[in-house]
Image (spheres, rainbow, N blue to C red):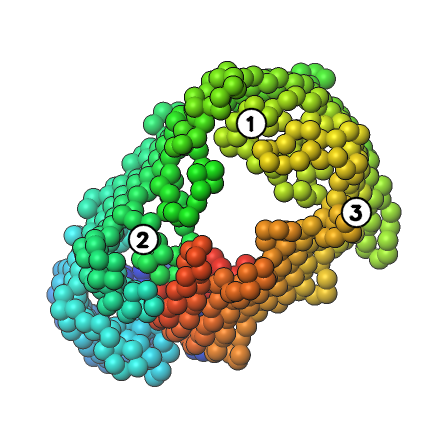
Amino acid sequence: MAIRRCILALFGMLGTPAAVLAAGLPTDGWQLCPAPVRPTLPSYGDDLVHVLADRAFLKQNGVSELQGNVQITRGDQTLMSDALSFDNRTQEVTSPGALTLETPTMQIRGGSGHFNLGRHSGNVNDTRYQYYPAHAQGRAAHIARKNANLTTLTHATYSTCPIGHQAWVLSASSLRLDRKDDQGVARDVVLRFKNVPILYTPYLSFPLSNKRKSGLLPPIIGESTNSGFEYRQPIYWNIAPQADATFTPQILTRRGVGLGTEFRYLSPNSYSVLEGNYLPNDRLYGNSRWLYAFHQQATPLPGLSTHINYNRVSDNAYFNDLGNSLDVSSTTKLERSASATYSAANWNITSRVQKYQILDPSLSTSDLPYERLPQIDFNGWLPDNKLGLQTMLNADWTRFIRRDSVTGSRLDLTPGLRLPLSGAAWFLTPALKYRYTSYHLLDQAPGTSADPTRSLPIASVDAGVYFERNAGTNTLQTLEPRVYYLYAPYRDQQNLPVFDTSLNDFSFSQLFSDNRFSGGDRVGDANQLSLALTTRFINADTGAERFSASLGQILYFRPRKVTLPGNPVEKQHRSDYAGRLSASLANHWNATGDMTYNPYDHTVDSVYTGVQYHLDRQRLVNLGYQFRRGSVDQSDVSFIWPLNAHWQTTARWNFSVRDGRVLDAFAGLQYNSCCWAARVLARRYVTNTDGKYNSGIYFELVLKGLGNLGNPIGSYLQRTIPDYASSS
């Protein structure tokens, strides 16, 4: 029994430092590390204490001694030593020589140890540990356990680098771990990279559990033509379990000194974020600059959800000049909105207000979005009856406001019926809607009604069949003809304002839409038939689609008279051909494409195509091109590729063929080792519609298992390069 108590105490004490130091660390990204050499340990398959030794002695004074290859195993933990003694009177255990504790997750070696089981205290000298899940290892000159809750370490180190190849190491002259207060305190903490001190703090406190703790976060460092050298130092404040804040003093060498803030609050029913940024005197701009924003999502009652999104900046050029490093983009307007939605079993209702701060002074009044003050939207549906008939109602009332424009309110009601019928190889869906819209207008053109209305039925029938055949080994081919008939009578709508309506871009999906306009101010007249054909090649074993191609066209039986202001009546008898393609080419190659072709002018009106080679998450090439006649003509190429086991390169080139200039381009290089990685990225991009460029160089140092220093280049690449996943 005495020996068993001794072993339990040793296991509990020696497990403390490594478990605390490695808590919460990531466990992936160690592919470049050598596999740790781990001894083969006995396995007895029970929870008993098993003792092996060359010799065992029980002396008259109550001292038990084990000598020669001592090995004590309990469960999956094994303690090894050359000699071990236990004094039953004083409850003291002594290992005068080297000792080793081995578990499935860690190994701890000590030069000698002395323990008191009665007081749950003891010490181990000249300790080295390894924690396998976090790939961590370190040393301590002395570990002392004062009692069951308090442990101290002197001259302790921590690193995830292999022993003997410590590219970085975190060290402390002393470390105090108090489980009762759930707090650790370290003094004279130094972070060294390549033997060069890069971070020092005389005092550091941290939680021993997963609780948050106030303190410094890794700095963000960069360089840009707009702001010069940039240094940001986040400071985290754990206000309460449900609230925290981050203050970020920042130095911009060309502009001055500023402060960023973020407050977060989490309750059982809401999440709120308040952000702010203040630059007291921007030397380049000649005045103070600021930003503040508030975002909240809440569920105050069952079925009720609310959302607030409020943003405001000091001036139109704020984001062009002071956008947050890699996240900056061309921003022409900032949204301010609030909404509340209540959802029941068969209906929901949403009320919202929406305004904007316009940041692009070149926008004309007609290009500015209308504000919705407010909008109320209702959607309801009845449960399907025995025949499968679906009944629904959409109702929307909105008050639209915009300076120097027609303003007013709009009520839009759309009840509808739909009867989906289907079999194993066919489907048929007739549908009928009735759309009623009324306005109450202010500042309308002279001679036009202040209360115009519009009402019309919309009828459609959607039908298709499926044919399939064997097309080779493990390959199934389908042939899927589809027809869609749409009828909507003509209603003169030229006297109606245009609050939120635009003409949808024509594409394959538009073949089966019941309105060629978005928004509620125009309902297209229609007497048309869409014809489409799709074929697919499918792996019969897995169901994976290897190839699909679709082609379709609309046949018009009369001109489309409903148009937006300034647009002519559409008189063609046929639409463009619309095609869609998706293919899994050779291994790791995929391609997608959409195209519309004008049969009258024999020209391509729009193209979107993308080709991707994706060998694995670190070998990726994306080729993209999009074209829409008269508006867009852009190519987009991006890749990330390893040069060898340690070096990677990445780049992106987004070019406007129409304007003859680069919209966004970057090139980067990464070095990746077992326990650290370094990234550098140079970027040049257009910041506004005038074509002004900003250029920047960004750095990031990744200390695996500890944290990142610098700009978050890895997360930026994940957002920018499709399907890229960082490994560190």
Can the viewer see residue 500?
yes
Q: Tell me the residue that label 2 is attached to.
A: 318
Residue 400 position, x and y percent, is 43, 27
**Quick check: 43 above or below 670?**
above
Q: Residues within 10 Å of mark 3 (few under 14, many from 20)?
A: few
| Residue 147, quarter of the rendered image | bottom left
Residue 512 position, x and y percent, is 71, 35
State the SS at label 3: loop
Residue pushed farthest front?
446
Three-letter amino acid code at the position of disc 1: Asp
Distance in Å between CA atoms under marks 2 and 1: 34 Å
Residue 516 position, x and y percent, is 65, 34
Q: Residues within 10 Å of mark 1 (few under 14, many from 20)?
A: many
Task: Name which of mark 2 and mark 1 comes first in the sequence.
Answer: 2
Three-letter amino acid code at the position of disc 2: Tyr
Residue shown at the point (79%, 46%) measured from the top left: 600
Look at the image and tell me in which quarter the C terminus lies.
Answer: bottom left
Distance in Å between CA atoms under marks 1 and 3: 30 Å
Q: Tell me the residue that label 3 is attached to.
A: 599
| Residue 82, quarter of the rendered image | bottom left
Distance in Å between CA atoms under marks 3 and 2: 47 Å
Can the viewer see residue 105?
no
Task: Name which of mark 3 and mark 2 comes first in the sequence.
Answer: 2
Residue shown at the point (71%, 58%) measured from the top left: 584
Work out whether residue 463 or residue 494 is closer to the camera in this orientation and state it.
Answer: 494
Tell me: 405 left or right of 298: right
**Quick check: 196 above or below 593?**
below
Residue 83 position, x and y percent, is 26, 78
